[in-house]
Image (tube, rainbow, N blue to C red):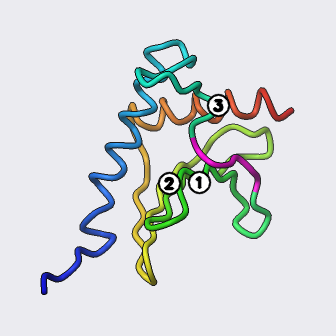
Amino acid sequence: MAKQETCDERIDASLQGDLDELREFQRSGWETNEEGYEFFEHGMSWEFNDELGAFVYLLGTGGPHREYRFTTDHNKRVREISYHYSDWFDHATRTISGSDFDLLAEVFEMHEEVTV
């Protein structure tokens, strides 16, 4: 029986796939992707988590669990973004930077515009 890869071994491919989906929406002007889904249909939820002190953009829950966490300052400017990947008692995290940070900061701003 083959050993299942750990979350740390799988997170980078998952993160890249999720970022690619967001870039596809960005290219469409944040409207629809090639499959016809609207941007705001992407992901499962967007909320502020008091316990984490961060905004959470939940992408999936059932094996694996995937989400972005956005930490902001008191003016709601994004200071840090992390990607979390969990599956059956295993967890891995990546800090987002560079052009990926810029992309996700734009996602944050759009979600906050519609929730204000």
Front position in the image: 67 or 33: 33
Q: Is residue 103 magenta?
A: no
Front position in the image: 26 or 53: 26
Disc 3 marks which residue? 40
Image quadrant in which the C terminus is located: top right
- Are dots 1 and 2 in contact, CB under 8 Å? yes
Which residue does the image show at 52% across and 36% down from the upper left? 104
Image quadrant in which the N terminus is located: bottom left
Disc 1 marks which residue? 69
Horizontal side of residue 60 vs 54, given as left or right: left
Secondary structure state at the residue bearing disc 2: strand
Q: Measured from the top left, where is residue 31 in percent x and y?
A: 57, 17
Disc 2 marks which residue? 82
* Residue 102 sits above or below residue 11 on the image: above
Q: Residue furthest bottom?
A: 1
Front position in the image: 108 or 32: 32
Amino acid at dot 3: Phe
Amino acid at dot 2: Ser
The span from disc 1 to disc 2 (Cα, nearest Å) is 5 Å
